[in-house]
Image: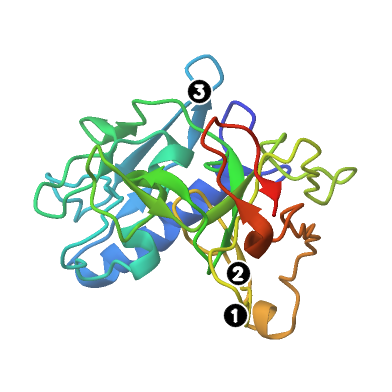
Amino acid sequence: MDGGTYTSGAKGLGHAFKEALDDAVVLMTSALSGTVSVGEVDYDENLRSFSFTMGGTALPADLQVVCFNCKSGTIPTGVSDAGFFSDSYEIIGGIPSRDVGSIVPAFTKSGSTFESPLPASLNSMEAIYLRCNLQTSNFQTNGFSRDSPDRNTMTETNILARIPLSRACFDDIFEFVQFEDTNDLFQLRLRQKTLDSLTLEVTDDKGRLLAEVDKRQADLGLMNFKCTLRWDSIADDVPPHMQRIVPDGRPNLPV
């Protein structure tokens, strides 16, 4: 993510932001009786912020940039389900709208120039999360799930393990994410006597499955992961039917 404008050179976050704006401008031009254009995207290395200028003959005076991060409510027209609850505000340094009934501008607007008020980021995930379909005896705050309302409470979670990401972007040398729990940090105590199945999922911090680049990617088995679990069987030294209670607190002894 380098400073300057984005017209040539290696592709990066600035290019992706410019292409997204170009796509939005095309939709706006087709809906309005006139033209709408967007200039180059600039990145300030000191402030770590983006800025761009809009123009055209049909530019609405009340035009604003909005980043939705809503868990519930009616999705506005033209907004996808993924876009209605997304981390785009973290990437481009905008202010999120978490209530569809109270939408706030994501960027600071001065005339026809827009600037991100917060620092931009190459990644919105600090870790990936391994979840399972069994009771984990773990708890989470409501921010770890889209299905939980935004409240300062805690609830039971299906998160089994948190795997930290040491890099904010892809690295050709360290292409795979690897983690080994050497201190038994992540444990699961089975509460049932039988286990029919165990389902594991890799998600982001908000419970969303990792995004597909292509819809065929998962069907072709190209989003698989490898996981090794250690199974410990714990048994009493003395069988329960041979134990007796000692009133003075001494250990149970066989009869």
Dot 1: element:
loop
Please identify, in this view, whether the residue under mark 3 or under mark 1 is nearer the observer.
1
What is the quadrant of residue 140 in the picture?
A: top left
Residue on which the image places disc 2 = 212
Q: Where is residue 242, by image quadrant?
A: bottom right
Residue 241, x across and y down, in percent: 64, 64
Q: What is the spatial separation of the Cα atoms under label 2 and label 1, in whole angstroms?
A: 6 Å
* Lateral position of residue 103 relative to residue 248, left or right: left
Residue sitting at the far top: 46
**Residue to which mark 1 is pinned:** 215
What x and y, as percent, mark residue 19? 51, 55
The residue shown at (17%, 50%) is: 99
Amino acid type shown at disc 1: Lys
* Circle 2 SS class: loop
Disc 2 residue type?
Answer: Glu
Q: Residue at x 60, y 69 (%)?
A: 212
Residue 79 is situated, as x and y percent measured from the top left of the image, at 29, 66
Judging by the rendered image, the residue that carries numbered circle 3 is 48
Check whether the beta carbons of the residues at disc 3 and disc 2 lie within 8 A of each other: no
